Amino acid sequence: MKYSVNIILLSSFLFFLSNSSIAQEIPKYDYLEVIVIQKANNSGRVKRIKVQEQKSLVGKQITIKQLEQLEGSSDLLNYMNTANWEFVDRQSIVSEENDPVWMSYIFRKRK
């Protein structure tokens, strides 16, 4: 009887241990950077969208050509949302007062 109680306790411990390791799995993401170049003195009007070749685009339904044909940052955000890419962050760089604003948009998609 005592032997069967030990087996039940041991199997219960192993069961809980295996479930906790599954629950702590870290999700993996693909990240994509899209550069948006805006005119400095034209109320943020987008001049160009540029995407470099990136490993995260391999095998995905979106392409560099499609992204670079978009006309505005709201179009970019809507397009990426439709393709199930989540917006993560945006960084901007301005060198001089009349220079264009370079903005880096970061998106992620669950693998």
Image (spheres, rainbow, N blue to C red):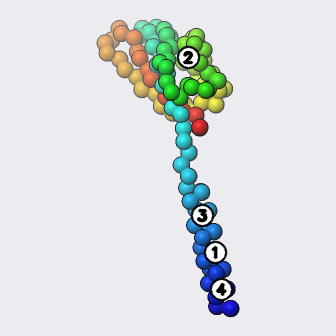
Q: Earlier in the sequence, mark 2 or mark 4?
A: 4
Q: CB under 8 Å between callouts 1 and 2?
A: no
Q: Which residue is mark 4?
A: 5
The percent coordinates of residue 47 (x first, y second) are: 48, 8
- The crowd level at tag 3 (other Cα within 10 Å; few <14, some 14-19, many 20+) is few
Residue shown at 54%/42% (left/top)? 28
Amino acid type, callout 2:
Ile
CA distance for labels 1 and 2: 53 Å
Name the mark on residue 64: 2
Q: Secondary structure at mark 1?
A: helix
Q: Which residue is mark 1?
A: 11
Q: Earlier in the sequence, mark 1 or mark 2?
A: 1
Amino acid type, callout 4:
Val
Q: Which residue is mark 3?
A: 18
Q: Earlier in the sequence, mark 1 or mark 4?
A: 4
Q: Earlier in the sequence, mark 2 or mark 3?
A: 3
Q: Secondary structure at mark 4?
A: helix
- The crowd level at tag 4 (other Cα within 10 Å; few <14, some 14-19, many 20+) is few
Amino acid type, callout 1:
Ser
Residue shown at 41%/17% (left/top)? 102
Going by the image, does 46 lie left or right of 82?
A: left
Q: Secondary structure at mark 3?
A: helix
Please state which of the two labelled residues, at mark 2 or mark 3, is closer to the viewer.
3
